[in-house]
Image: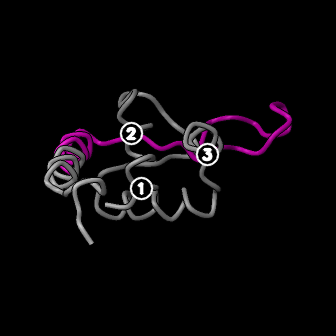
Amino acid sequence: MTGPTRAVLDVLLADPEADHYGLAIGAATRLPSGTIHPILARLEGVDWVSSTWEDIDPSEAGRPRRRLYRLTDTGATKARAALAAADARRARLPSPATVTP
C-alpha cells in the first residue's frame, strides 16, 4: 500500500460515517488533488468507497457542488484489515540502524 493511499484511508476511517470531499482530504493529508482523486476513484472501483454529488444549489452556495465520498461498510472493514496487514509487514522489516552494509 502506498503512503498516499494509507493517508487517504486514515482520513476516511477517522470518521467512516461522514461524507468527505477532496479539498478536505487534501487539507488533512497535505496531498494534491491530482493524487487524492485517482486514489478515491480506485477505492470506488473496488466498492470500498461510494460517492454522490452534494445536494446544493451552486448559485446560492456561491461555490460548485462537491463530490462527497464515504466508506462503504465493506470498505471500512477491508481498509482496516489492509492497514493492519501493512503495519504487520512494516514491523517485520529491519530498521536502518540494524542493517549492516
Picture residue at 29% right of the left edge, 42% below the top: 72
- Please report the bounds of the magenta region as a residue range: 54-82
Q: CA distance from mark 1 to mark 3?
A: 12 Å
Q: Which residue is mark 2?
A: 10
Q: Quadrant of the C terminus?
A: bottom left
Judge from the rendering whether residue 29 lies leftward or rightward of residue 77; answer left or right: right
Task: Check the image and name the residue furthest to the bottom.
Answer: 101
Depth order, front residue of 53/79? 79
Q: Are marks 3 and 2 in contact (CB under 8 Å)?
A: no
Q: Say above or below: 4 vs 54.
A: below
Picture residue at 80% right of the left edge, 31% below the top: 61
Picture residue at 57% right of the left edge, 37% below the top: 28
Q: CA distance from mark 2 to mark 1?
A: 10 Å
Q: Which mark is residue 32?
A: none
Picture residue at 18% right of the left edge, 48% below the top: 91
Q: Pick whichever of labels 1 and 3 is earlier in the sequence.
A: 1
Q: Which residue is mark 3?
A: 30
Amino acid type, residue under disc 3 in the picture: Arg
Residue 31 locus on image (x, y percent):
60, 52
Q: Which residue is mark 1?
A: 3
Q: Pick whichever of labels 2 and 1 is earlier in the sequence.
A: 1
Q: Is residue 62 magenta?
A: yes
Amino acid type, residue under disc 2 in the picture: Asp
Residue 67 locus on image (x, y percent):
58, 47
Residue 76 locus on image (x, y percent):
26, 40
Tag 3's secondary structure? loop
Q: Is residue 44 magenta?
A: no
